[in-house]
Every structure is written in C-alpha cells, then in structure tokens.
Image (cartoon, grey):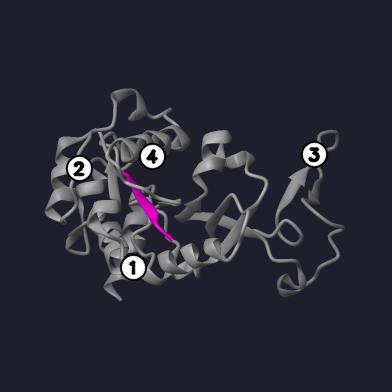
Amino acid sequence: MNPLYVIPARGGSKGIPHKNIRPLAGRPLLHHTIGAALAAGADPARIIVTTDDPAIADCARAAGIDVPFMRPAELATDTAGSREVILHAMDSADALGIAYDCVALLQPTSPLRSPDDITGAIALYADSPGCDMVVSVMESRANPYYDCFEADPATGALHVSKGDGHYTRRQDAPAAWQLNGAVYVIRPASLRAMPMGDFPLRIPYPMPASRSVDIDTPVDWLIAEALLGK
C-alpha cells in the first residue's frame, strides 16, 4: 500500500488551548502522532500535517515534516467537517504529485496509538477488498444489550436499548464497539463519493482501552500523561 498520512491539527482548540503543541510527557502532542507514523515506516514526504496555525506548522517541521501548504480559514472553524479537511489534503497531495492508494487519517488527540496499530489497520485494509474504510475501535463501555437503556416516551420507564434484556452477564452479550479516533484507513474514491458516516462497508480494527485515550478535556490529558508515564 501507498498511504497518504493525514494529520489534522488546527489552531483553534478551546477545551485545551494550543493543545496540539502543548508538551505531553515531555513532547508536543503533535509529535507523538508524527513519531508513531514515522516508526510505522511512513515516508516523511507522504505525511501531511494540515493546519491553519503557523506555530503548529513550525512544530511539525521541528519533527522533520515539511508543511508545503496551510489549511484555508474556512476549514479551520469549529463547524468544519473532517471530510472536507481530508479532501483538501488529498487535492493538495495531488497538486504536489504525491500518488497514494489510501488515506490514513491520524488525529493528534490519540497519542497512545502504537506504530503497530497503524501498520495493522493498513494491513487489514489491504486484506479487505472493496471496503470503504478500516477504523480503529475499542470495546464500548456501555453495551446496548446489557447496561445501556432508553426511556419510553410515554411512560418514562427504562428499557434496554437492544434485545430483550435477558442477559445477566456482560460477557454473554454480543460485543459492542465504539470508535476511538486513533486510526482511519480510507478508500479515496469512497470519501469523494460520500461522507464517512454513509460508508456501507466499515471494517473494525480493535484496540485496547489503554491505547484508546482520545484527548478532548483536561481530564483526558491527565489520563494520557499518566499512561505515558507508565
């Protein structure tokens, strides 16, 4: 495979200001993802850090990654979609003459993913002809067959979200997965045709909870720092 590695890192983080360049366990958050991509065998010329922030671009260059273009302001707002950001990176790669047959989206907010997670997801994509995307997942903390409930609109009474509610042990219930945000390996033609949520064939790449921390809040940051410290 010849992946295009896309690392989206805009400057307007509100929950944790400047989080992409803030040191986490002694290194800028962004460097954890760049380092994992490089350790997974990525050619630095095939890694695109898409950002609107000159400080983030300088941080990427300090890790050995060229940043030949800046993300347009309209793609760096709170409402800008991931699909549009990736499509812009793909178009920019096309203009730079970078050939690729899949896109590996690596979000900086998942600093505990390993190089093996990246290569494993890409290998699974290569072994899944016709799939639209391989996406990393973790086992869900709430299982809709066991301990996830909805309220009846008429009575307000709780009922299990899925199934008949007869599972008495979590391990007997069908597995439920949630996206962990760490790795997406995407078919370019599928992304150009439709949003990722409409992909008909998404293949899960399971990861343990210990590598699935997605940093969105200060508490997430503390958890990631503690795990990295171990």
- What residue span does the magenta drawing correspond to? 1-8
Dot 4 or dot 3, earlier in sequence: 4
Secondary structure under badge 4?
Answer: helix
Q: Which residue is mark 1?
A: 40
Which quarter of the figure has residue 43? Answer: bottom left
Secondary structure under badge 3?
Answer: loop
Dot 2 or dot 3, earlier in sequence: 2
Dot 2 or dot 4, earlier in sequence: 2
At 25% from the left edge and 36% from the top edge, which residue is drawn?
Answer: 11
45 to 139, vertically: above or below = above
Q: Residue furthest top?
A: 74
Q: Residues within 10 Å of mark 3 (few under 14, many from 20)?
A: few
Q: Residues within 10 Å of mark 4 (few under 14, many from 20)?
A: many
Front tag of 4 and 3: 4
At 79% from the left edge and 53% from the top edge, which residue is drawn?
Answer: 162
| Residue 62 vs residue 128, the one in the foreground | 128
**Amino acid at circle 3:** Gly
Placement of the N terminus among the 4 image quadrants: bottom left
Secondary structure under badge 1?
Answer: loop
Secondary structure under badge 2?
Answer: loop
Spatial separation of the CA atoms under disc 1 and disc 3: 50 Å
Q: In the visual, does 118 lie left or right of 11?
A: right
Dot 1 or dot 2, earlier in sequence: 1
Q: Residues within 10 Å of mark 2 (few under 14, many from 20)?
A: some
Spatial separation of the CA atoms under disc 2 and disc 3: 54 Å
Would you say the residues marked 1 and 2 are in contact, meaning their CB atoms lie under 8 Å apart?
A: no
| Residue 32 vs residue 84, the one in the foreground | 84
Q: Which residue is mark 4?
A: 90
Does the magenta run of residues contain 3?
Answer: yes
